[in-house]
Image (cartoon, rainbow, N blue to C red):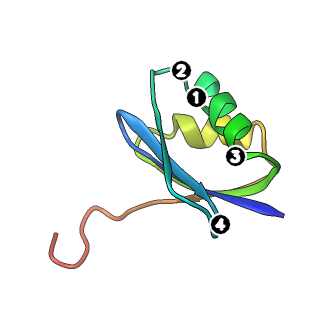
């Protein structure tokens, strides 16, 4: 089972498959097209863990992959 790890920001998506090399993909406001390109490059993805500032990438992934875990950052942590 391939697990996809995604950090989706406002301008680009950084991703890797578990135990793989980190890659980046530009985000052009079309979440579904961005996710299609990401999944084509990642291969056979069965699950994903996502941090997403807008929620659009997480939603697009959830419509294509059965197991998607969305991680949310708190408003404050470690004094920041």
The quarter of the image holding the N terminus is: bottom right
Q: Residues within 10 Å of mark 2 (few under 14, many from 20)?
A: few
> Which circle, 4 or 1, is nearer the viewer?
4
SS for callout 3: helix
Look at mark 1 in the image and give the residue it sits on.
Answer: 34
Residue 14 at x, y percent in the picture: 47, 48
Q: CA distance from mark 2 to mark 4?
A: 25 Å
Q: CA distance from mark 4 to mark 3?
A: 10 Å
**First in sequence: mark 4 or mark 1?**
4
Callout 1: SS: helix
Residue ID at (50%, 56%): 22
- Measuring from the top left, give residue 71's x and y in whole percent: 52, 61
The residue tagged 4 is: 18
Disc 2 versus disc 3: nearer the observer? 3
Furthest residue toward front: 21
Frontmost residue, 12 versus 59: 12
Residue pointed to by mark 3: 42
Asked which secondary structure carries label 4, the reply is loop
List the residue tagged with mark 2: 30
Using the numbered discs, state the Cα–Cα distance from disc 4 to disc 1 in whole angstroms.
Answer: 20 Å
> Do callouts 2 and 4 mark residues in contact (Cβ within 8 Å)?
no
Mark closer to the observer (1, 2): 1
């Amino acid at each position: 089972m391939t697990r996809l790890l995604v950090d989706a920001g406002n301008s680009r998506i950084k991703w890797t498959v578990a135990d793989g090399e980190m890659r980046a993909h530009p985000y052009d406001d079309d979440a579904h097209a961005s996710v299609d390109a990401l999944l084509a490059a990642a291969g056979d993805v069965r699950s994903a863990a996502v941090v997403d500032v807008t929620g659009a990438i997480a939603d697009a992934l959830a419509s294509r992959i059965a197991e998607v875990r969305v991680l949310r950052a708190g408003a404050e942590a470690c004094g920041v």
